[in-house]
Amino acid sequence: MVDDLLEQLRELEKEGAGSIATADGAEELERLRVDLLGRKGRLTGILRGLGGLSPEERPRVGAEANRVKEVLSARIDERKAACEVAAAPEAHVDLTLPGRARWRGGVHPVTLVVDEICDIFRDLGFSRVRGHEVETVEYNFVKLNTPLDHPAVDMHDTFYLGESLLLRTHTSPVQARVMEQFRPPVRVVVPGMVFRRDPFDASHAPGFEQLEGLAVDEGITFVDFKATISEFARRFFGPTTKTRFRPSFFPFTEPSAEVDVSCQLCGGAGCSACKRTGWMEIGGAGMVDPAVFEAVGYDPERYTGFAFGLGPARIAMQRYGIPDIRLLYENDVRFLEQFV
Amino acid sequence: MNVSYNWLRALAPSITATPSELADALAMRGAPVDELVELSAGIGDVVIARVDEVRQHPNADRLRLCSVDAGSGARLQVVCGAPNVEAGGYYPFAPIGSSLPGGVEIRKAKLRGELSEGMLCSARELGLGRDHAGLMALSGSEWQLGASLVDQLGLNDTRLIVDVTPNRPDLLSHVGVARELAPGGVADITLRPFSAEPPALATRNAGGDHGEMEGIRVVIEDAVGCPRYTAAIVRGVRVGPSPEWLATRLRSVGLRPINNLVDATNYVLHEMGQPLHAFDLDRLGGGEIRVRRARPGETLRTLDGVERELTAEILVIADAERAVALAGVMGGEESEVTAGTTNLLIECASFEPQRVRKAARFLGLSTDASHRFERGVDPELQLPTLSRVVDLILAIAGGSPEPTLLEVGSGSAPRMIVPLRLERVTRLLGIELDESEIERLLEPIGFVMEAGADGLAVRVPGYRPDVTREVDLIEEIARRRGYASFPEQLAPFRPTTVPEDPLVPVLRRVRETFTRWGFLEARTAGFAPAADSRVPLLNPLSSEESHLRDAVLPGLLRRVEHNWAHGVRNVRLYEIGTAFLPAPGETVPREEIRVAAAFTGLSEPLHWSGPGRSYDLWDLKALLEELAATLGAAAPQPATVGGATGLLDAVEGFEVSGVGAVRAEAGAVLASSVDSPAWADRLFGLEITLSAADVASIRYAPLPEYPAVERDLALLVPQGTAAAELERVIRSAAGTLLEEVGPFDLYAGAGIPEGTRSLAWRLRFRRPDRTLTDAEVDRSVDGVLRALEELNVSRR
């Protein structure tokens, strides 16, 4: 009697498993669950035979019945999950739909350039300082060895607020202000807006960014000057970047230089961006003129130093391939979003 | 400065480099070449032709029919509209099938019914000058018909457009550029005489402030403005066109040939760098040249035909009666050389740079002469230049010179001697150079080395007024040696004494906040119209930019409008910039660093799962709260904010104030403040004054160890009782067990008594030392409800 019941249970397990494995869909599996394991199902039917067994024999069959029930129940669940996965493509979720995005924010491309330049110079020992945008004639020109009746003043078309008050035409007045306030060694970079009386066109803006640098101490030479600028250029533009220093003229540096870097687009071979020269101008620089040291009360026999002025707006235009400076100041969202 | 390659090589045959090599060399010597112009470009097909006969065109008053011999044997008929075409004249001719600069192709054509077999050309059509008043007439008759114009005129030339910095007036002449470029420098330059037997002219320098020559008296009244005045007299000249070689030279540097006398002075100016002026001697009144300040109210009609009113600042050349030229700037019309001139007085003077500069600026004139005088002309150059121009005039215009050149003034300034210490060279340039190398570098361009007390004493040539100090010599050494020849070796450095700008970390955190909020940084120049500011510019570019801004937000609103105008609906901009405020009792305005933001449109990019939500006042408040917290300022308070800028809604706004120097205002932007399209969403704006002092500092708080209990209270609140007031009462009544409280639901309408609203709050209680009991929480909630009764607030 016991063996007979156990045999029936094994039969049910085998047959049930077969049916479950070939069942198609959740509905059919539910029907099988009722048929095999339900209150009026086949397992219940087999267990009715328990009444004919002795109390000692019942647990053995009962335990086997429970095992079969668990196995079949698990099989049904597995099969059901498998059927659902198979049916998924026709179901509700189209995973090709776009995700839920957030607005992406970011800084202006010129800020990207300014911050990167300042970070590099911080590694080279320069602290970042700020100056005023409204300056005096004294600081913008005179203390920088530029008498007002000198033709060099023509290089700047200046906005005036008063007879001796103007919008700074370069960040260089901060050189004098810093040196008057601090003793050497001085190493600073000064980003900020400067102003020239040029109407907007593709390459001019009445207000734009400049970044001044100044290093003054005993024993700073032209060799240090070139090395520092070239080190910056390699860190900023890439390790293979070459630099070129061309003699030039600024009243507040001597010797003065224009600094070129090998063109970022063609690598120096010559292209339309660099007007076939292979070089891109990044700014003016030079050794601090002794007259400037005298104007701020430094001993020119004791101290030497170098200064430079870079154009972050122009560098941003070169780096990102921006053809027209007006794009930088129109602040079209579709433009700014390209730099986040 | 326009430089002709052929002219340079004629002066210094040792220059053998190509034009582009010279351009590179000049760039590395401090005078970059902006452009190389191939002068014969596009005119290789043009030949020399003679017009043998000129007839009136039968059908057009202004056209003529020319019979042209272009060397082919055939007689070509050419229709020509130029007024100066003459039978027997030689002209450039573009035959059928040829082309001209700009791609014009010459084809056989009928003009008003008459056949035209080619084209007679003006200088402008050939790209050789601006002159298009008539054909480019070739003087003389020794031309080979049909020969290439380029070959015959020596037009195979390249113009170098050199960018000369203000410190290098020596490069404003062909001699100067040749001196810089020739391998042997000064020694390589030969000024070949123009005449077979150049005149030997003596010099008479009477000393003092006046002198006399052949009935002409020269008086210098202003010895500062004119240290030296030299003059030559040539009688019996014949005015006419210049020979082609001279016209070609002038065209090669972009000048228009005028007549042989004017051309001679222009030629010598561009060769030597010393300006000259030729007067018609017979039109100078009273036999006198007087160098003096202009008299008040005095006027002069200059060569350009403009009647100019002068001031005492301006130095003039006058005859006995009136001003005849602006010293160093431009001559007068009345005394200019004309076709009828036979006797000349040629002026060659030294004028003070500042005086010339003032006059040129006052009159708004910049001429070849003033450009050079402003920058400094070699004080030793006047007599050699005068001899040279007399030689040239005799060669091309005949006449006979007075055998003596007149010289008035202090004579040659002594050459500047500048001491140079080798130790100083090393200290500045970082490498050691010996005396022989320095001499090798400087000697070719005219510097002379002598032994000095403390090293070298260097005699500076007169054409280098920029070199007056030791450091100028050191620059010259570095420049001549080539900047590329210096090594690049990073040296150790001492730390800077200058502290970092304390605003830098503040700005970084502000930018981080806005980036997190999805905002884009804008940058503007900072100008404003008068309506928006009280800090005016004296010389603005436009009325829209006539002032400096006293707030950042208005300019940012213009940027929002720009985006709207381009159909962009979702705009989130912020700007960090300077505001300029009038400072009482000060001439210099106060500068404040501000951050402003303006935003409108959807709060998140449109997604298919829903309609999206537009920004509202609560986004503004949260942004302001976060910024205030970042800056270490107090929480924003509702406020009437319309006032400061007048741009914001006076009802829906907030302000931050009272803690540190941070000040802020924020609100909905008034519709009247912006030009918005119909489809635009509401626009919100804020502006905060930043200060370095307050960046919120961060402290760790221990995490709780025991669980919290939460209770929700739905409260019936009378209208007019503020949520902030409720929160204050709840916090104070709940005691120390209350960890956090905040509203989570607001409802008014059906089921709620008139004049009240339902505001639901969630309270979270916790003890740091053990688990709370329900009884404790109940007691606290009861206390809260009792306290709220005093505000007429009850549980719903």
Image (cartoon, coloured by chain):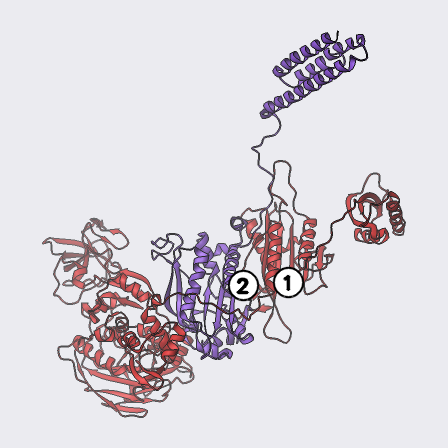
Chain colours: A purple, B red
Query: Which is more toward the observer, A88 or B186?
Result: A88
**x and y percentages locating residue B58 in the rendered image:** 20, 54
Find disc 1 in the rendering and name its residue. Answer: B690
Amino acid identity at mark 1: Leu
Q: In this view, does B752 lie above or below B64?
A: above
Estimate how packed mark 1 is, as few (under 14), some (14 to 19) or many (20 or more) residues with alpha carbons within 10 Å: many
Residue drawn at (75%, 13%) of the image: A61
**Does residue A176 show up?**
yes
Q: In which quarter of the image is the N terminus of chain B?
A: bottom left
Residue B384 relative to residue B72: left or right: right
**x and y percentages locating residue B653 in the rendered image:** 71, 55
- Residue A298 numbered mark, or none: none
Chain letter for the residue marked with disc 2 in the picture: B
**x and y percentages locating residue B403 in the rendered image:** 18, 87
Residue drawn at (55%, 54%) of the image: A107
Residue B649 relative to residue A199: left or right: right
Find disc 2 in the rendering and name its residue. Answer: B545
Q: Which of marks 2 and 1 is nearer the N terminus?
A: 2
**Does residue A207 show up?**
no
Local SS, label 2: helix
Q: In this view, does B237 lie above or below A99?
A: below
**x and y percentages locating residue B188 in the rendered image:** 21, 73
Q: Is the Cβ of the residue at disc 2 closer than 8 Å to that at disc 1?
A: no
Residue B415 relative to residue B750: left or right: left
The answer as to whether the residues below labels 2 and 1 share one chain is yes
Residue B371 relative to residue A189: left or right: left
Amino acid identity at mark 2: Glu
